[in-house]
Amino acid sequence: MQTKRWNVNKSNNQKNYRENIAEAALWLKAGKVVAFPTETVYGLGGNIMDDDAVKAIFQAKGRPNDNPLIVHIARREQLNALVSEIPPAAKELMDAYWPGPLTLIFKASKNVSAAVTAGLETVAVRMPAHPVAYDLLLEADVPVAAPSANLSGRPSPTTADHVWDDLEGRIAGVLDGGTTGVGLESTVLDVSGESPVIYRPGGLTFEQIAEIVGHVEVDPALLSESETPKSPGMKYTHYAPKGSLTLVRDNNDIPELVAQARNEGHRVGVLTTEQRKQSYDCDFAFACGSDDDLLSTAAQLYTGLRQFDTEQIDVIYSEVFPEHGVGIAIMNRLRKAAGGRIV
Ligand code: TXA
Ligand code: MG
């Protein structure tokens, strides 16, 4: 399959922008699978009214069938056809944070196909805060199922080039809107039960959710390896670079670990920040943002993980990051990428 690439960067002139969005929207509506930028990561969209389109998403990504998709909408009214109930806490959260990096899990209405929910009785919905996503969803005028637009197991894409590297030839097209903002996926929050439960930490912080709903729980699987995650996608090894990644609690231990691995003949990389990039004697150091700005680390993380592949690094050591705010999501992704290895 030939994959089309539309330029929808802001620098693009208005007429081309409109035409490109219109064509991509038409393709989506017609059942083709199209990647588009959101404020978190690029998504791989398909019309939820078309089971073949939804199946094509799973096929293009090589995604396990038991992993449900998030439905993306541009207007709040679209929610009514998707869910059987909108709890008061969900209303308050949507008022506060939609559009934005918050995915809510509702009891699903009967209209939603099992191809989207993987047969669950709930459905995940979000309203992305990105002008291209908004314009596309509005123009297509159908709810769009969209997982992250990477091959299953690879780091999520934060640029159209990342999408291209993984999916060129496997999807109909990609809207290139430049680099995404947050750089990590949305926070997944279940609002279908008694009290809200975080299934996946993400771009919207625990603190921001608690501010609105007061009490918020966390899926026990996020705290202990022995629990089964409530969100099917959380049980897979994700975000993994090709080299073997180990997290290191104390930065002072990194130089010796690096020296040892290099002696063994490996190409060794370090994931650090601007402050210490120069201080490691390794084959490739990636500055993942700055110590004084966790958001900059989130924005760079997946580019960094992919960069180690490009540089053909086979052993990677990563610093750890403070676990507050978006740092909780950063460390969640890093732990998964490292398969739990931490020294
Ligand atoms: O930021 C994002 O959320 C991006 C952009 C493209 O919107 N999308 C994304 O989708 O990260 P995906 O498919 O990579 O991750 C969706 C997560 C998976 O862990 C999946 O298991 C979970 O949401 N999920 C979806 N529906 C669910 C449901 N009904 N119950 C529990 N978990 C669900
Ligand atoms: Mg994903």
Image (cartoon, rainbow, N blue to C red):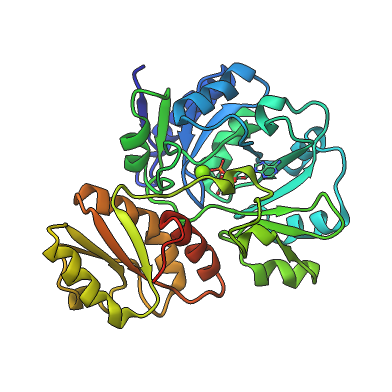
Please state the horizontal and vertical placement of residue 70, each as a whole percent of the image: 63, 40
Please state the horizontal and vertical placement of residue 29, each as a whole percent of the image: 59, 21
154 with respect to 143 (left or right): left
For the point 31% across and 50% down, which residue is it? 306
Of residues 128 and 22, which is closer to you in this image? 128
Please state the horizontal and vertical placement of residue 217, each as a whole percent of the image: 75, 65
The part of the image, by quadrant, that contains residue 72 is top right
Q: Is residue 142 visible?
A: no
For the point 29% across and 79% down, which residue is it? 253
| Total numbered circles | 0
237 with respect to 135 (left or right): left
For the point 47% across and 38% down, which residue is it? 36
316 is higher (above) or lower (below) than 257: above
Q: Residue furthest bottom?
A: 252
In what quadrant of the picture does the C terminus appear? Answer: bottom left
The part of the image, by quadrant, that contains residue 196 is bottom right
Of residues 232 and 185, which is closer to you in this image? 232
For the point 65% across and 51% down, which residue is it? 229
33 is higher (above) or lower (below) than 176: above
